[in-house]
Structures are given as C-alpha cells and as structure tokens.
Amino acid sequence: MKSRDGGKLDRRDVLRVLGAGAGATTAVAGALSTSAKADSESNEEKRKARYKETDHVRAYYRVNRYPS
C-alpha cells in the first residue's frame, strides 16, 4: 500500500484505518437495528406483561434453591 506522498504505509496505519471502518460500520448497524425494533412495537405491546413463570422457569428456581 502506498500513502499519498509516495511512501509506504506502516502496518499500524493500516490497522488503524481498518479499525475505524469497523467501528463506524458497527455504529451504523446498531442504530438501524434499534430504530427498526422501536417501530415494530405498538404502545399496547410495550406495556403488556412479558414475564411468564413456565415449567422450565420453576425448574430453574428449584434447582438453584431460590426461595418460593
């Protein structure tokens, strides 16, 4: 790889550029995924109860000796 002034780029410079690109890509992807999820739920769905104590949850509590 060549730099603008005709000299070679150090490998640290290459890694720095690649790291910055990966960070920017992650930030954009994270922003897009959170906005898509927020739009898919209505206000009623946001307020409903989500926790359900099923058989496997009760078994987890029993095995780990949580007080009942």
Image: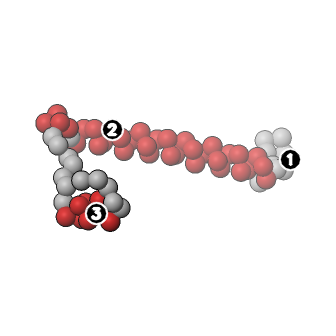
Residue 10 percent location from the top left of the image? 82, 50
Figure quadrant of the N terminus:
bottom right
Q: Which residue is mark 3?
A: 62
Furthest residue to the top?
43
- Dot 2 corresponds to which residue? 35
**Residue 10 in sight in this render:** yes
Q: Name the residue type under label 3.
A: Arg
Q: Residue at x 58, y 48 (%)?
A: 22
Task: Kindly report the distance in space between the C-alpha atoms of the residues bearing marks 2 and 1.
Answer: 43 Å
Seen in the image, is 48 located left or right of residue 10? left
Give the vertical position of 21 relative to 55 (above or below): above
**Helix or strand or loop: what does disc 3 sit on?**
helix
Q: Which residue is mark 1?
A: 7
Residue 54, x across and y down, in percent:
18, 60
Q: Marks 3/2: CA distance?
A: 38 Å
Q: Nearer the viewer, residue 46 or 9?
A: 46
State the residue lying farthest toward the right: 7
Is 17 placed above or below 64 here? above
Q: Position of residue 40 (x, y in %)?
A: 22, 42
Q: Residue at x 25, y 60 (%)?
A: 57
Q: Is residue 63 above or below residue 43?
A: below
- The image quadrant that residue 32 belongs to is top left
Of label 3 and label 2, which has the lower sequence position?
A: 2
Q: Residue at x 17, y 43 (%)?
A: 49
Task: Inspect the image, locate mark 1, and give the three-letter code of the amino acid beneath it.
Answer: Gly
Q: Secondary structure at mark 2?
A: helix
Separation of residues labelled 3 and 1 (CA atoms): 67 Å
Please rate how many residues cluster around mark 1, counting C-alpha atoms within 10 Å: few if below 14, some from 14 to 19, many from 20: few
- Dot 2 or dot 1: first in sequence order is 1
At mark 1, the secondary structure is: loop
